[in-house]
Image (spheres, helix red, strand yellow):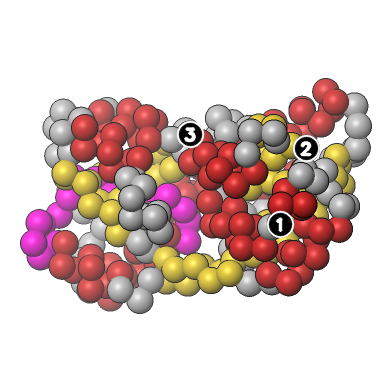
Amino acid sequence: MPVKTIVLFRSKSDDAVNEDIYEKLLTEHGCAVKTLSPIQFHFINQDLLSTKLQSGDYHSLIFTSKRAVEAVQQVLTDHNRKRFQRIYVEGPATASLVKDLFGSTVEILGAESGGGESLAEFIIKDVQNREETAKLLFPCAQARLDVLPKRLSNTPGIHFEEITVYETIPSDSLDKELQEYLTNHGRPDVFGFFSPSGFESVYKSCQRIGFDLCDNKSVLISLGKTTSAAIRHSLGSKSFNERSCSKPIPEEFLRVVETIE
C-alpha cells in the first residue's frame, strides 16, 4: 500500500488502556499513525440534563457522539437507566460506549446507518414500523448540525427535544503538537478529519504555524458528508485532494486509504 504515514485529528479516549481503534487497524496494515486532538470538551447544563433524564417524559435517547454519552454518564442514576426502551446511535464506537453505560437490556439501534441524515431516516422508519408516538431526547454539542433535528422535528408521530450537554473549543496544544510532528516527520501522506469543528480548528492552526494543507502532497480524508462539506467550504477554490468515508468506521477509513495510489 503506497500510504505509509497518517495523522488523525480526533480526540483519543480518556482511558489510556483503551487502544484507539483507528490507530490499531491502520497500524496493522503497515501505516505509521499519529493522533492529535484538535478540540477540547466542556460539559454544560448538567442539572437540566439530570432533570430531563429523571422526568420520565422520554422513551428513547439519540447519541451522535461519544462525548454526549459521557455527559449523560455524569448524571445518570441506576433508576433512570431503566427508563429508556431504545437508544439510537451514530457509529459503532458510540454504540459500544452506550452498551457499556446502559447494559444489554436496552435496544441500541442505528449504529451502521452512517451520518446524521441517514440516522434520522432510520429513526423515522423504525418509529413508523412500531406505530406509536416516539418521545426522543437528543443530548448534543453546541456545534451540532441541523440535519437530524430538522428532519425529526418535522415528522408526525415524533416528539423530539434536544439539549446541549457539551461545548467544543480549539485545543490549546494543537499548534505545538502539529508543529512538532511536521518538524520530526515531515508532511504525512494522509490527514484524517472526523468532524467539521475538528477540521476548522486544524485549518486555523495550520494558518498560524504557516503550513499549507492545499498543495496536493497530502490526501485529506473526511468522515461523513458534513465534514467533507466543511473542508470544501473552508478551502474553496484552492487545489486539494479530498476523499470522503461513507460510514464512520475504521474499516471504511482503511478502504479509502487503500484507494490512494
Q: Which numbered dot is residue 77? A: 1
Q: Would you call the spot at circle 2 few (<14 residues within 10 Å), some (14-19), or many (20 or more)?
A: some
Question: Is residue 189 shown in magenta?
Answer: yes
Q: Residue at x 65, y 58 (%)?
A: 72
Q: Position of residue 194 (x, y in %)?
A: 42, 50
Quarter of the image containing the C terminus? top left
Amino acid bearing label 3: Lys
Instruction: Give the x, y percent position of residue 209.
Output: 22, 73
Mark positioned earlier in the residue sequence (1 or 3): 1
Choose mark 1 or mark 3, whichever is in front. 1
Q: Using residue 105 as the reference point, say whether residue 92 is left or right of it.
A: left
Residue 204 among those drawn in magenta: no
The residue pinned by badge 2 equals 85
52 left or right of 3 in image: right
Dot 2: element: loop
Q: Disc 1 versus disc 3: distance between alpha carbons?
A: 32 Å
N-term-proximal mark, 2 vs 3: 2
Q: CA distance from mark 2 to mark 1?
A: 16 Å
Compared to 43, does 80 lie above or below?
A: above
Residue ranking furthest to the top: 129
Label at residue 234: none
- Residue type of the residue flagged with mark 1: Thr
Q: Which residue does the numbered mark 3 point to in the structure image?
A: 247
Task: Write the residue at 70% across / 35% down.
Answer: 106
Span of residues in magenta:
182-197
Q: Amino acid at mark 2?
A: Gln
